[in-house]
Amino acid sequence: MKQAINQYSLTKEASMRCLLFLFYISPSVISAQEIEESIALSFGTVAITGNNSISTLELPRSGRNLVITGNLIAVENGEPGRYRLTGFPPNTSVDIEVDSASMTAGGTGIPEPITVHNFDIASVFTNDLGEAEFQLGASFSTSGNGGDYQDAPYSGGAQMRLNFWAPSVADFVTVTQNVEFRGEVRSGFALNEAVAMHFGTLFARGEPNNQASLRLFPDGRLDIDNNGDAKILSLSPPRAAVLVVSGAAPNRELSIGVDSSDIEMRHRDNPTGPHFILTNIETSPSGTGRTDDTGELEIGVGATLTTQKTSSNVVYPSGTYEATYSITVSY
């Protein structure tokens, strides 16, 4: 009888230990939360025209109504980040925090950095299935220290923290997710000569005391002024130059500068012979021009061609005369 009682006591103690063990592990089972980054937050493409002071682009979480201060120009619009939550407690408020971060050219840490800060996040509340979607906006700022920004893709990342009440553990829980930021700095744009300036075929004569001139307007019109024995005759139609800007910010005013110096236009095969003088380069539009919706602008270019004052009456030799001029287009 004594042995039976002892055996019963051991069996009872073992059973109690098993029950206590099962009771201990059951509360630690929590469903996994997932944060899906559907679209990375991007400031789009910007031109940086100066960095002597801090410039900022504010991109709201809606993606609309950008606010730009300083020397930034939006070339292509940015896009807010988009995220989807699953596996969270149903009908629960989720508080979201994101650390400030730096973006660098190619994500390699090469200066100058763009700082991402002042994140714009709406209140997030899960549905009956424990799911939610939200968008993320932010401010993007230059360093303002005078350093130069490369024309390159910029990238960076930060940690996002999501805090919520988990009824299964009767406590607040924090989960983290690394999020990416993207954008591109493109302060330059292309300027190409679609049509070269050509004064056509001319007869020209120089003399010691007077000069003849041919004015080629940017729209292709022609005006000739002959004086004394100095003459220019147009034997075939001239052609104004056409320059095309591409890759600039859309609907943006650009400055157009011309070379104001006198440029000698010399015979290709006989550069020591009589030459023409290229002056008064003019453009259309003049001074400034606005790009279209695609960031392009067409610029017509004309100039005035003048004969040289020669030591005696001289007929210009047949052949090709050449010169190089410059046009500067900038933000």
Image (cartoon, grey):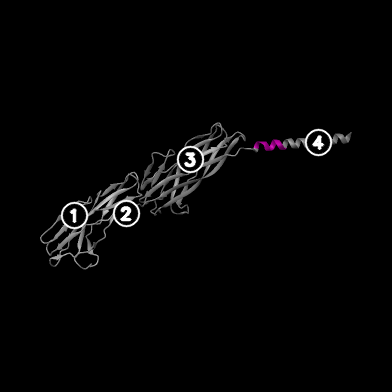
Identify residue for label 3.
Answer: 82
Q: Are marks 1 and 4 in contact (CB under 8 Å)?
A: no
Identify residue for label 4.
Answer: 11
Observer-side mark, 3 or 4, equals: 3
Observer-side mark, 2 or 3, equals: 2
Q: Determine whether, in the image, residue 161 is placed left or right of residue 238.
A: right
Q: Earlier in the sequence, mark 1 or mark 4?
A: 4
Q: Earlier in the sequence, mark 3 or mark 4?
A: 4
Mark 2 vs mark 4, CA separation in Å? 93 Å
Q: Residue furthest left?
A: 228
Residue type beneath disc 2: Asn
**Circle 1 SS class:** strand
Mark 2 vs mark 1, CA separation in Å? 23 Å
Residue type beneath disc 1: Arg
Image position, residue 64 (x, y; %): 40, 39
Mark 1 vs mark 4, CA separation in Å? 115 Å
State which region is magenta: 21-27
Residue type beneath disc 3: Arg
Q: Determine whether, in the image, residue 132 is placed left or right of residue 255.
A: right
Q: Earlier in the sequence, mark 2 or mark 1?
A: 2
Image position, residue 184 (x, y; %): 42, 49
Mark 3 vs mark 1, CA separation in Å? 58 Å
Mark 3 vs mark 4, CA separation in Å? 58 Å
**Circle 4 SS class:** helix
* Among the 4 quarters of the image, the one containing residue 315: bottom left
Observer-side mark, 2 or 4, equals: 2
- Quadrant where the image shows the N terminus: top right
Identify residue for label 2.
Answer: 192
Question: Of 203 and 212, which appears nearest the observer?
Answer: 203
Image position, residue 72 (x, y; %): 37, 47
Q: Earlier in the sequence, mark 3 or mark 1?
A: 3
Identify residue for label 1.
Answer: 215
